[in-house]
Image: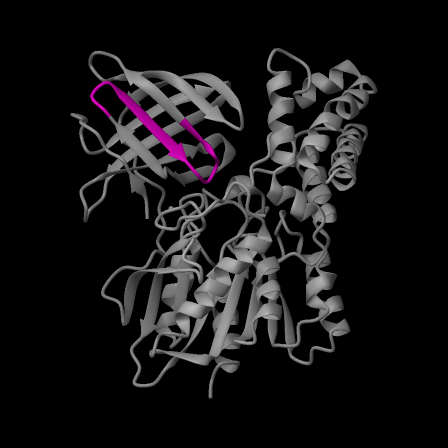
């Protein structure tokens, strides 16, 4: 998945709401500190249009760059920066000459002292595929709501220049709350995809996720089911636009978006095709355990250590399955987890972070993340419940070097279940040398994402565009 952060367990792998108070900082400043051995950088910039401050967090040691700050408050004596993407942020006070911020980092229930020092401004990462004007299409920023007006969506619709209604796709982001460009590691893959498709005659709607940018709604308690409702609201909006052909509405879902797209297609006859980008073709439990196994192997755990971690995952998942009531689950978690802890050797527990001065906080954070509504829903996810019923055309693409949603078994899942559905029009595309973000990669590991300048491989754009045009031409 693309951005669900779960402490000690799962692999690491936004239009910005700004509340800016009085300040006398230069418009661009860079602040750097350390959370233990991990570097954290806060980069503050100035929006070229509104001239308001914007900001991103970088964690270069984890390969995470450009994590958008969704709430930024700069006062005369203090600064607060929060990112809804990672559900974490910093608050601190300036020293006399505004060269140091003394404060705390808060995330997942943990509070950690953090000092940020002002450093020389750094250039952001190079992203040569980011489109630059002039554009041969119209781009319209817009706001629409769901049927009962409880959620407002911020989005951008790119429209080809055409005398007749155009086919359109809705882009659906991966896991974790992301902006309409699916900004991650300093890349904007949905911006690149939208630009390419609209240059080729296909309109594109890309939308801020719940709680990000100009989209409202409860993200903390939402699951894939809720996000499917958000996509249905987008379809309803597109049907009001005269520039759009309502008979040619498609969905492109990345990672978790590849789960959501079939769910939406089964609920709306308006969906005429699906493109799955690194979508999930195995159960949620299988995917999580494979991600955990890969991550802990990479972290240097031996085979026995990895098995102990997987046994822990079995305990966590079994509890989630057995106790649907949240209060009961929380009461059962501590004794069940303690029983597992008591069976483990001390050196393993220290290496895994389950013994030491911060162990209780780490375990509490892990429990909160593991038993979030989203994760509990994902534990129960089975692609057979949707894909065996999908009859419309499907393109399922994966990068051969994807280490998050492994290509072989997940593409095979799509092939198996679409065949069972009797679907006569689907294509399975394994793209050599590409990672989970469809970048040309060396190893495919998450740590490479930020260092790769390419955002979305041209060959992946071509495969997708050619297939969509072939399935949307009148």
In the image, residue 360 sits, relative to residue 54, either above or below, namely: above
Q: Is residue 33 left or right of residue 278?
A: left
Which residue appears at 22% of the width and 44% of the height?
Answer: 47
Please check the rendered image and state whether residue 130 is part of the magenta-colored stretch, yes or no: no
Coordinates of residue 444 in the picture (x, y in percent): 58, 47
Q: Residue at x 36, y 42 (%)?
A: 125
From the viewer's side, name the closer residue of 126 and 284: 284
Per the rendered image, the range of residues in magenta is 75-89
Q: Is residue 270 above or below residue 68?
A: below
* Picture coordinates of residue 214, whole percent (x, y): 35, 50
Q: Is 87 a magenta residue?
A: yes
In the picture provided, is 402 more to the left or to the right than 177?
A: right
User: Which residue occupies the foreground of this view, 133 or 142?
Assistant: 142
In the displayed structure, does residue 172 sit left or right of residue 371?
A: left
Residue at point 63%, 57% (across, down)? 400
Q: Nearer the viewer, residue 152 or 440?
A: 152
Q: Is residue 78 above or below residue 177?
A: above
In the rendered image, which quarter is residue 384 located in? bottom right
Find residue 190 and report its horizontal and vertical position in percent. Answer: 43, 58
Q: Position of residue 339 (x, y in %)?
A: 81, 21
- Residue 37 shows in the view: yes
């Amino acid at each position: 998945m693309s951005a669900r952060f779960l402490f000690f367990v799962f692999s690491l792998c936004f239009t910005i709401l700004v509340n800016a108070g009085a300040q006398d900082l230069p418009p661009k400043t860079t602040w750097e500190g350390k959370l233990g051995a991990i570097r954290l950088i806060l980069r503050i910039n100035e929006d070229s249009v509104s001239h308001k401050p914007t900001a991103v967090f970088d964690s270069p040691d984890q390969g995470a760059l450009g994590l958008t700050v969704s709430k930024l408050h700069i006062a005369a004596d203090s600064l607060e920066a929060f990112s809804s993407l990672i559900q974490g942020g910093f608050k601190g006070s300036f020293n006399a000459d505004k060269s140091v911020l003394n404060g705390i980092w808060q995330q997942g229930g943990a509070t950690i002292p953090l000092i940020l020092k002002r450093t020389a401004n750094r250039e952001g990462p190079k992203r040569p595929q980011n489109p630059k004007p002039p554009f041969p299409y119209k781009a319209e920023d817009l706001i629409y709501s769901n049927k009962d007006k409880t959620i407002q969506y911020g989005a951008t619709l790119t429209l080809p220049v055409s005398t007749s209604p155009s086919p359109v796709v809705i882009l659906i982001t991966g896991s974790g709350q992301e902006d309409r460009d699916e900004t991650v590691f300093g890349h904007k893959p949905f911006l690149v995809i939208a630009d390419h498709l609209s240059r080729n005659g296909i309109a594109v709607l890309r939308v801020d996720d719940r709680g990000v940018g100009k989209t409202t709604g409860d993200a903390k308690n939402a699951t894939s089911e809720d996000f499917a409702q958000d996509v249905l609201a987008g379809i309803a909006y597109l049907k009001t636009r005269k520039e759009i052909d309502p008979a040619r509405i498609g969905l492109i879902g990345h990672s978790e978006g590849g789960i959501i797209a079939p769910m939406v297609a089964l609920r709306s006859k308006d969906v005429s095709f699906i493109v799955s980008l690194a979508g999930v073709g195995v159960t949620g439990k299988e995917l999580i355990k494979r991600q955990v196994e890969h991550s802990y192997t990479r972290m240097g755990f031996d085979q026995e250590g990895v098995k102990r971690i997987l046994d822990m995952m079995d305990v966590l998942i079994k509890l989630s399955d057995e106790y649907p009531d949240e209060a009961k689950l929380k009461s059962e978690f501590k004794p069940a987890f303690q029983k597992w802890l008591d069976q483990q050797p001390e050196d393993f527990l220290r290496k895994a972070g389950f013994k030491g001065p911060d162990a209780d906080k780490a375990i509490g954070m892990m429990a909160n993340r593991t038993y979030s509504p989203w994760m509990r829903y994902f534990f129960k996810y089975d692609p057979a419940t949707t894909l065996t019923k999908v009859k419309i055309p499907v393109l399922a693409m994966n990068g051969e070097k994807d280490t998050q949603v492994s290509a072989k078994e997940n593409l095979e899942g799509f092939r198996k279940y679409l065949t069972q559905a009797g679907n006569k029009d689907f294509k399975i595309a394994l793209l050599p040398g590409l990672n989970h973000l469809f970048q040309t990669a060396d190893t495919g590991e998450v740590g490479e994402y930020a260092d790769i300048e390419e955002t979305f491989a041209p060959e992946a754009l071509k495969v997708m565009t050619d297939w969509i045009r072939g399935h949307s031409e009148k």
